[in-house]
Amino acid sequence: MRSVRSTLKCYEYITIAHKHIELLATNDGKRAVIRLNRIELDTYDIPEGSEIILEASSRGSAPKFCSLGLTPNYDLDRTLDIDANLLQTTRFNLTILDPDNPIRKVAECCYLDYTEPTRNGKRSILPTRKVEDLGRRLWRLSEEDGFIIDINRTIANIDDIIGSNEFRAIALPEITKQIALKVANENSDLSPTVRQKWREVFGAALSDAGSDPDRDDEEWAEEVAERFTQTEQFTDGYLGARGDDE
Amino acid sequence: MTAHRLRVYTDAGLEEFTRRWKIAKDSEELLDVEDMLDDERWTKPITDEPVVEFHEFPSRRECAQYFLKLLSENGAALQAAQIDPATSVHLWSWLISVWSRWLQQLNGKQVPLGEQARWIYMPSNWNRYYRHLLAGPYLIAVANQDKLQNAQILLYNDVRKPNTAWVEQICGRREIVTNGTLLGALSDAVINPRTQKPRPGTSPLTRGKRYFASHGIAEAGTIRRLTKVHNQLMQPWHLPKASVEQLEELFGTEFSKFFGS
């Protein structure tokens, strides 16, 4: 019998970057068909014969799994079929299992965002990924072809925490401010495409915050975050649950 | 007993229901919403026929089965109205209104309303969504409809007394509620097959941190510890695919009471 302590050491699996995976959803209004449109594993050290599993899970329902077969001959045409109503609230994970122990993960990519063909293949502008180098912090804003929220996978119950109204209310305004600061700083190395994309996302919040050329970036970012928090209702769920929304 | 067409509250109806709930909560009076049930000012019909009929549920299991059947049989009508039972606050607020009088009485005494999440479904709150008196059992049943007995550890108790230590510790972890193998092992270990209730002697497994602190001993082998270790194990292991034997090996001897050893 193996002790629990020894199993807890098995943290050495690979985190696959979101940029190496693209998930596609075809939605006819009733059913949504999910397929992996692209997966690039060349840069990762994945043992041959590892099983690739796509998982879709939504609140209250048993998760659905789809095996894409074994590396390197996996089949991208295999699909997951889910209720279209659940598409917006479903989480997608990709897991790759050890050929020598088919319940042990060797690689994973969490919280995959799906794209829909009707939206010209655009991905979510602010994806999340689970990482292990955050110490005791819950999250961190990173840049990698755009902004990504890194989530601390070593914190117990982190899925519940980041899915909560409390996290949304407390973290998203600050995340918005950090993004606005980067967008405001013309000297930062943010790519022009990403900068423009975020200007479009901020939209009304940006114009409400004004465009004074002598502005203080810190104050301006604060104002954008404040406006954006209102328009995106970051705190409404939390306040509503407390009964403070009257 | 009057049967009702399946309905949902409109936005105005939900607002009125919430207003009355808050007044009842603050005043410790009975929540009275029966006049709203079929009122077109507050509700919108989903079915043409009366399909919802109040009856008492002997336990959360019968409650879960009832709503699983009701919402599944009327799935097409709900879908046409774009109502998703997994997320609709308007639906569950109306349904709980039908059962509201019964839910506030137990053994001839008034049951306090308790926290808001028991009455107003909070689908986006991962720590509270399962606490809704009616949606909570339903969601457990949806996730385990292939073998509901797997979830008996979460469904044996009274609908009006939902917060057992088992429910509180397990339901906050979606990955356990939806892992039929693990949940089935827990139910087998804890539930007496004859009574369908926890076996005598299993209550120490629900002890909390305070007990161990006051006795100066390390917490071990409890359901609370099991959920914590599960959170760790699910990082490197794909637990939905694990057999009972594999789970037993992964969790180790500390949790042997949950795996029949």
Image (cartoon, coloured by chain):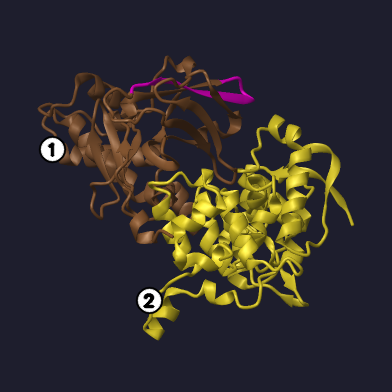
Q: How many marks?
A: 2
Chain B tint in image:
yellow
Chain A tint in image:
brown
Asked whether the residues under the numbered discs 1 and 2 touch, taking CB atoms below 8 Å apart as contact, a structural biologist would say no
Residue B145 x/y as whole percent: 69, 46
Relative to B218, say whether A86 is above or below: above
Q: Is residue B66 visible?
A: yes
| Amino acid type for the residue under numbered disc 2 | Ala
Magenta span contains residue B196: no
Residue at disc 2, secondary structure: loop
Q: Residue at x 20, y 30 (%)?
A: A183
Front one among A36 and B82: A36
Chain under numbered label 1: A
The answer to whether residue A19 is left or right of residue B39 is left
Q: CA distance from mark 1 to mark 2?
A: 54 Å
Residue at disc 1, secondary structure: loop
Circle 2 sits on which residue?
A: B218
Magenta span contains residue A32: yes
| Amino acid type for the residue under numbered disc 1 | Asp
Circle 1 sits on which residue?
A: A216
